Each structure stands twice: as C-alpha cells, then as structure tokens.
Amino acid sequence: MQILQTVLERVIGFFVSYGFEVLGALLVLFLGFKLSQWAANLTLRFLEKKQFDLTVARFMSGTVKGLILGFAVIVALGKFGITIAPIVAAIGALAFGGTFALQGVLSNLGSGLSLLLFRPFKIGDTIEVAGVSGVVEEVKLGSTILTNEDGERITVPNRHIIGEVVRNSFGYRVVDAAVGISYDDDPEQAVAILRKALEPFPEVATAPPAIIGIREFADSCITIAVRYWVPTKQYIQLSYAINLAIFKALKEAGISIPFPQRDVHIISGGVPNSTTSAR
C-alpha cells in the first residue's frame, strides 16, 4: 500500500506540475494533424483544378502535410522543454553519412522531382534518351517507365534523363524508307505512286505530311525516299505493311526495282576477247 501510495503521489505531482504542458502538447499535435490534412486536401484540389500532373499534385500535397506536421511536433516537444538542436545535429550526421551509400537513390529522387516540376515530357509522349526509346507510361520519383513497339517495358533511372539530350516526338515515330527505281522509269510517276500507296493507311499522320522525293542517284538506280509519321506502338506493323503496299503498287505500274549490276571484261593475253554481264 505504501508503494502504491508513493506512485500515486508522484503521478499526481507530475500532472500538477506538467498537466498544462501535456495538455498543450496534445492540443498542438491534434490541431497540427487536422491543419495538415486540411492544407493537403486544399493543395491537391487546387493543383488538380489547374490541371497539374497527378503525380506532381500528390507529391506537393504530401510535402505540405509533412511540413505542417513537422512544425507541430517541434512545438509540442518545446512544451516539454525538449530542444531539437541535438536531434537535428544527429539527423544531419546520419544524412551526411548515408549520402555516400545512397547517392544513386538520392540522385534518382532529385532528378525525378525535377522531371515532375519542369515536365519536359508527359505520359503518352515518345522519347529517346540514354540509348533507348519508347512511349512514356509512368513518371515516378525514382524512374521513368517506357514501353516500345514490341511491348517491352523499359525502366530508365531518372538520373540518366536529367542533363541528357531528350528527343520527344510526342505520340509518333518517323519511318524513313527508300526504294530504288530504274533510270528508264519516270521518278515523278514513282513519287505519285508512293504517295498514293500511303492513302489506305489512316494511321499515317497528315501533320506533318509525308515527304517523298529523290534521295540520290545511285550506280544502278534512282533512290526514292519516303518519310512519314506513325503511332509509336504501331511502328513495326505499319512500316512492314506499307513497304508491301509500295512494292505491289510499283509492280502493278510496271516500274522496275533494279538490282546492282556490273560489267565484267575478261582479258586473255592482254587483249579483251569477250564481255559478259554479271548480276
């Protein structure tokens, strides 16, 4: 009984001495929690109204909530006379030591934040960076997810994007094809046939329009080049289908696609005695 009475007296004495501090600390934490929720929701709604990227909006909302909660905790600790200077110093020392071990992770996170804020590309764009290309499916803080025309999922760490040259062709990718015609054929007719061969394919972009013309005068043929834009995810199947359509259209028009030829002169005893054509 004596021990119980002693404990009870000490508890009563603690609440008499620190009751208001405890009550004040709990009140500060409660108000801080409510205020952080209200501010986070308000920030999220505001950014969504301004049509910010959802990932950016959620990140900013969480940041606002964390800052307000952190301030509330600091104030609550102050009610008990606890100074945060040693805590901050310890956290700083740990962060300094952990930076070397986590520098890759931290670099990815910092780069991801930069991508979310400045938005050099968005979901659905076709980008080429760090030796890979594909359609942007998701932008995370640590990495960017791409998918290519083969359906492969490519994860690019964000630190390999920031500071590099990024090619953004939005939702399309250019097809650069070429076909050779004989010097006896009319190149203007061939250009018209190639342009008409693209018409049955509504997926081919009209802006910018296809570019068709003479690329070069080769040894055995006139090279006709054709450049057109197609949706990135249909790049392979469309380019193959259009190549077949071009081949059929040229064949039906009687325009030949020559193969390389060389004239070979056979010399016997220093005097040419015959001439053959090798293909």
Image (cartoon, helix red, strand yellow):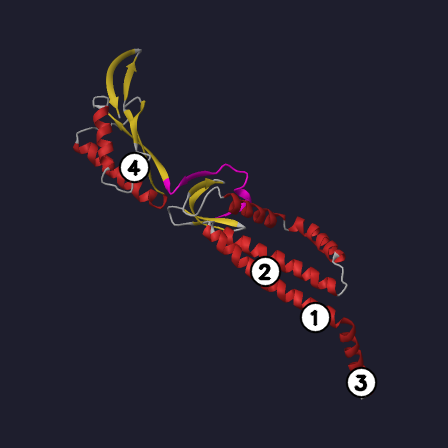
Decide if residue 114 is on the left or right side of residue 73.
left
Instruction: Judge whether residue 117 can be spotted in this image.
Output: yes
Rendered residue at 22%/28% (across/down)? 190
**Mark 2 to mark 3 CA distance (whole Å):** 42 Å
Are dots 2 and 4 in contact, CB under 8 Å?
no
Q: Amino acid at mark 1?
A: Leu
Decide if residue 115 is on the left or right side of residue 275.
right
Q: Which residues are magenta?
A: 155-172
- Residue 61 picture location, percent across and down: 54, 55
Rendered residue at 69%/67% (across/down)? 25
Sequence-wise, the earlier of marks 2 and 1 is: 1
Sequence-wise, the earlier of marks 1 and 3 is: 3
- Residue 138 picture location, percent across and down: 46, 51
Q: Amino acid at mark 4?
A: Thr
Can you identify the residue that label 3 sits on? 5
Sequence-wise, the earlier of marks 4 and 3 is: 3
Tell me the number on the disc at residue 206.
Answer: 4
Sequence-wise, the earlier of marks 2 and 4 is: 2
Can you identify the residue that label 2 sits on? 36
Can you identify the residue that label 1 sits on? 23
